[in-house]
Amino acid sequence: MTALVFIGTFVFMEFVAWATHKYVMHGFLWSLHKDHHVKEPGFFEKNDAFFLIFAVPSMLSIMFGTFYGWELLNAAGFGILAYGIAYFLVHEVFIHQRFKWLRNSNITYLKAARRAHKMHHKHLTKHDGESFGMLLFPFKYFLEERKRMKQSKTS
């Protein structure tokens, strides 16, 4: 049961992240997210505050799950943590290259995720955005990337 809660929480977090990105980050907290779309000098962004905001429910779930022996709450907390790690690796490392690891990939899914996110960033204001998800994105980007990779192999 704890494995199901862990996996379910991980999957659910993609929808939480999508809704938060669309309605909070591109909504009333645009002031924190704006510097992620319109680059300013420096390594850190105000947008990094969202990592701390998302860490709170994970930390509290793990802490209270451990204190009171609630394994399911622990599983949910670790599911949130695992999603945060995946988000960090895909978003910060692979897509935005804030750390110079995982620069290139021949994996269609990863290339499509990068392309979908780049399409999200072509919008510089909080309005008219697209592709708010990170791990799940419109299927058309996957198909386009697969077609592009097939064409590059034949040419």
Image: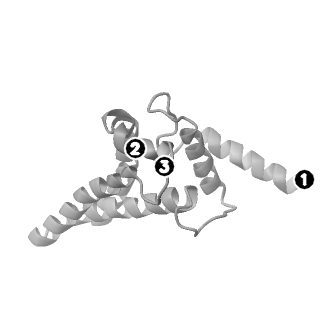
Q: Is any atom of residue 155 visible in this view?
A: yes
87 left or right of 142 in image: left
Residue 89 coordinates in the image, percent (x, y): 49, 63
The residue beneath circle 1 is 155
Query: Which residue has dot 3 on it?
Result: 40
Give the class, few, some or many, for how many residues have Cα within 10 Å of label 3's Cα (few <14, many ≥20).
few
CA–CA distance between discs 2 and 3? Answer: 12 Å
The amino acid at mark 1 is: Ser
Q: Report the mark closest to the observer, 1 or 3.
A: 3
* Residue position for label 2: 33
Secondary structure beneath dot 3 equals loop
Q: Marks 2 and 1: in contact by CB < 8 Å? A: no
For the residue labelled by badge 1, is the local secondary structure a helix, a strand or a loop? Answer: loop
Looking at the rendered structure, the kind of residue marked 2 is: His
Q: Return the residue found at the far top.
A: 128
Could you tell me which quadrant the N terminus lies in?
bottom left
For marks 1 and 3 on the same chain, the one whose residue lies earlier in the sequence: 3
In whole angstroms, how far apart are the C-alphas of marks 1 and 2? 41 Å
